[in-house]
Image (cartoon, helix red, strand yellow):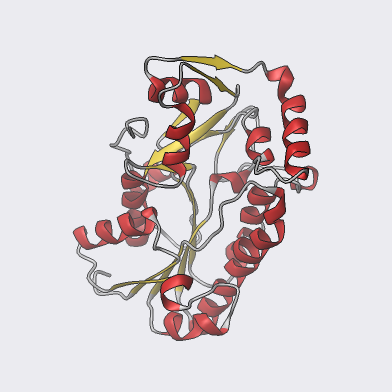
Amino acid sequence: MKDSHILIIGGTGFIGKELTRTLASNGFSNVKIVSRSEHGVDVTNCASLDDHISKADVVINMAGLVSFLKKDQRLLMAVNYKGALNVLKACEKYGKRLIHISSSAALGFGDGVINEDFKFDWNKYKFLNYSYSKHLPNAAICNSELATNIIYPPLVVAPGDKTNTKKLIDYVKGKKFVFAPPGENGIIHVKDLCEAIVLILEKANNKQNYIVNGENITFKNLFSAIQKKGRVVKIPKFLGRAVYTVGRILEFFGLSVPSESLFLGFKKRHFSSDKIKKDLGFEPSHDPKNIN
C-alpha cells in the first residue's frame, strides 16, 4: 500500500496540501497532485483525466466548487456532479480505486442525528444548489462495481487558511457584536480530516462511506469561541424565512449574498462520526475552534 501511486485530483487548496504532508508522514512517497490551473486537468473534460488516472493505483477526487450563490448553479452542476461522474467513469475504465471527497451538505439536514444512512427528501430542496450538486453523484459512485469510498466532511478549517477559515474570522473577529443564525453544523480541523482520509485509504473496506466530523456546534457558540470578547446575538428561528427571502432578493439584484448559507444557518445539522470511530479507530485530536 505504501508504494501505491496516489493521484489527488484538485488538491492544490489547503486541504490537498495538508493531505500531501499527512500522506508523506505516513510513508506514502508516490503521491501526485493534479489540478486545472497547474496541470490542465479539468474534471469537466474527460480527455484531460485519462493519462493521469491510467497511471494511478488510487484516485482521491477532491475537485469541487464551493459556492452558495444562485448564479453559480450551472457551474456547480458541471464540476460537482458531472465532473465527479467523469472521474468515476475514468476510474472504471482503468480499474482504479476511487476515494471521493463529498461534503456533509450532501446528506441534508434534520432534527435528529445524521449518519451515513440518513434519508433526506431532495425533491423539496433542489434549490440548495451546492448541497444538491454534492449529493447527485453519490448514488452512481455507490452503485459502481469499482472499489469506492465516499467521505463526508463538514466545514473544514485551519489556521492560515485563506478561504473557509478567513471568511469565518473576518465576519466575527474584532466586532463588538455579531449576529449568529440559530442553526448547528459540524466542523473539523484540516489535520484531523487528512488523518481520517489516510485511515480510510489504508483500512476501509470497499463501499464503506464515512462522515468525518470533529464536533457539532451551534453557530452562536462557534462565533463566541472566535470572538472571545464581543457579544454574539442569536437570530430568532422564526425569522429564518424572512432572512432567506431578503437574501434571495439582494442576490437577484446582483449582490453576492449566499442565500443557501442563510437558509442552512437556520437548520440543525448534527453529524455522527460513530461509524469511522468504530470501524477504523478514528479520534479527532485538534480543536477546530482554535483557528485564530
Q: Is residue 218 visible?
A: yes
Residue drawn 47% across the image and 61% down it: 62
Rendered-image quadrant of the C terminus: top left
Residue drawn 45% across the image and 77% down it: 96
Q: Quick check: 124 left or right of 184?
A: right
> Relative to residue 107, is residue 135 depicted above or below?
below
The x and y percentages for residue 270 are 54, 31
The x and y percentages for residue 51 are 45, 86
> Relative to residue 194, is residue 262 depicted above or below?
above
The x and y percentages for residue 181 are 60, 24
Residue drawn 41% across the image and 27% down it: 173
Residue drawn 73% across the image and 18% down it: 238
**Observer-nearest of 102 and 145:** 102
Rendered-image quadrant of the N terminus: bottom left
Quadrant in the picture for residue 246: top right
> Relative to residue 173, is residue 105 depicted above or below?
below
Q: Is residue 145 visible?
A: no
The x and y percentages for residue 18 are 31, 54
**Observer-nearest of 14 and 61:** 14
